[in-house]
């Protein structure tokens, strides 16, 4: 199960990178205005409109792969085997007890003692 989730992570990462690249390669809506007047798009690899269809379909397929891989990772995360009857506290490291005959260490911070007598204003009436 662990290997399969790593494979799905890799597929998700590659599809996300592919979507980013394909979206950046596509032309905007206003970029098609120049192709109607012979702006040299007919000499491209896919013809005048073939590249738009190919890029948009490939982007759609990669988006579907991305969503399926996301759902698969969510399924893997929710259906992990759990230790039944276990406790979260079982995973804590064991604390060592102080050696017999030694006083426990006090970590509380207290003000340093002073040798001055309390002032008259400090004594409650």
Image (cartoon, rainbow, N blue to C red):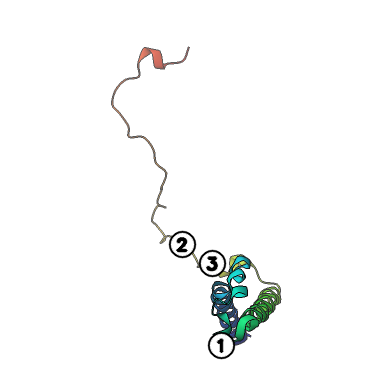
Apparent side of residue 124 relative to residue 87 in the rendered image (left or right): left
**Picture quadrant of residue 113:** top left
The secondary structure type at the circle numbered 3 is loop
Q: Position of residue 3 (x, y in %)?
A: 59, 87
Q: Which mark is residue 83?
A: none
Q: Which mark is residue 45?
A: 1
The secondary structure type at the circle numbered 2 is loop
Q: What residue is pinned by disc 2?
A: 97
Q: Position of residue 30 (x, y in %)?
A: 61, 65
Q: Position of residue 40 (x, y in %)?
A: 54, 80
Decide: is 62 above or below 116.
Answer: below
Q: What residue is pinned by disc 3?
A: 92
The secondary structure type at the circle numbered 1 is loop
Mark earlier in primary sequence (2, 1): 1
Q: Position of residue 23 (x, y in %)?
A: 58, 73
Q: Quadrant of the N terminus?
A: bottom right
Decide: is 102 above or below 19.
Answer: above
Decide: is 87 above or below 69.
Answer: above
Which of 104/21 is in front? 21
Report the Cα–Cα distance between label 3 and label 1. 62 Å
Report the Cα–Cα distance between label 2 and label 3. 15 Å
Give the residue at the far left of this rendering.
Answer: 115
Which of 15/31 is in front? 31
**Picture quadrant of residue 74:** bottom right
């Amino acid at each position: 199960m662990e290997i399969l989730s790593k494979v799905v992570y890799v597929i998700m990462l590659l599809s996300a990178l592919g979507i980013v690249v394909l979206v950046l390669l596509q032309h905007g809506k206003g970029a098609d205005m120049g192709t109607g007047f012979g702006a040299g798009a007919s000499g491209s690899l896919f013809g005048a409109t073939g590249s738009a269809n190919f890029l948009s379909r490939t982007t759609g397929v990669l988006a579907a792969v991305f969503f399926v891989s996301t759902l698969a990772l969510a399924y893997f995360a929710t259906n992990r085997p759990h230790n039944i009857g276990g406790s979260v506290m079982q995973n804590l490291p064991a604390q060592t007890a102080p050696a017999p005959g030694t006083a426990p260490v006090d970590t509380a911070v207290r003000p340093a003692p002073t040798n001055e007598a309390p002032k008259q204003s400090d004594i409650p009436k």
